[in-house]
């Protein structure tokens, strides 16, 4: 694959909710769950990566956030990802790059959003998307 040309089209914190009533003075061990998904808009040639993170303690939700990052591609880059059936195929390495960019942005946003709260010292753990994403995303 040749070099892909893309740019951030938009970043959006789609959801942010902090449930401080579920926090004790010392939160202690916090559980985190992360879900990532991809979608593609063929007309705009834009890939969206959405990551949803939930923090909980003893099954009580402490915080939930959803971040979407949109990546626009040059036409020649889209064409080089097209397979023989005309589908656009995003290989795992490409998906890993976009999920990593989005997750890193979300980590920074949550750091800023939780300042002054009991979650201020909790930073989302790193995620190695290369170990998670193992299948291509095919835009039909």
Image (cartoon, helix red, strand yellow):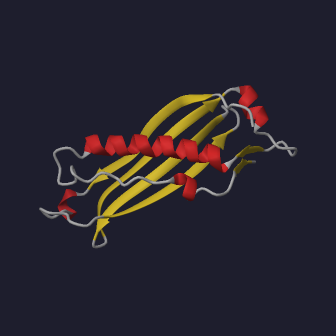
Q: Position of residue 85 (x, y in %)?
A: 86, 46
Q: Position of residue 118 (x, y in %)?
A: 17, 54
Q: Is residue 66 left or right of residue 31?
A: right
Numbered disc total: 0
Residue visible at 46% across and 35% down?
11
Residue visible at 61% across and 39% down?
47
Q: Is residue 79 left or right of residue 103?
A: right
Using the rendered view, name the quadrant where residue 21 is placed.
bottom left
Task: Using the image as rendered, state which of residue 18 and residue 116 is in the foreground.
Answer: 116
Relative vertical location of residue 33 with respect to residue 36 in this rendering, above or below: below
Q: Position of residue 31 (x, y in %)?
A: 33, 66
Task: Using the image as rendered, state which of residue 112 and residue 29 is in the foreground.
Answer: 29
Relative vertical location of residue 67 with respect to residue 125 in this rendering, above or below: above
Residue visible at 63% across and 43% down?
94
Looking at this view, name the residue that lies furthest to the bottom.
Answer: 58
* Placement of the N terminus among the 4 image quadrants: top right
Q: Is residue 124 left or right of residue 81?
A: left
Looking at this view, name the residue that lies furthest to the right.
Answer: 84
């Amino acid at each position: 694959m040749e070099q892909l040309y893309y740019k951030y089209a938009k970043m959006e914190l789609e959801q942010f909710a902090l449930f401080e009533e579920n926090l004790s003075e010392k939160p202690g061990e916090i559980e985190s769950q992360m879900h990532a998904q991809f979608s593609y808009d063929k007309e705009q040639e834009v890939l969206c990566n959405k990551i949803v993170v939930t923090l909980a303690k003893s099954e009580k939700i402490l915080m939930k956030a959803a971040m979407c990052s949109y990546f626009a591609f040059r036409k020649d880059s889209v064409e080089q990802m097209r397979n023989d059936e005309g589908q656009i195929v995003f290989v795992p390495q490409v998906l890993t790059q976009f999920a990593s960019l989005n997750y890193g942005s979300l980590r920074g946003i949550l750091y800023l959003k939780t300042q002054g709260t009991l979650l201020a010292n909790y930073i989302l753990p790193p995620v190695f998307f290369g170990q998670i994403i193992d299948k291509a995303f095919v835009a039909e």
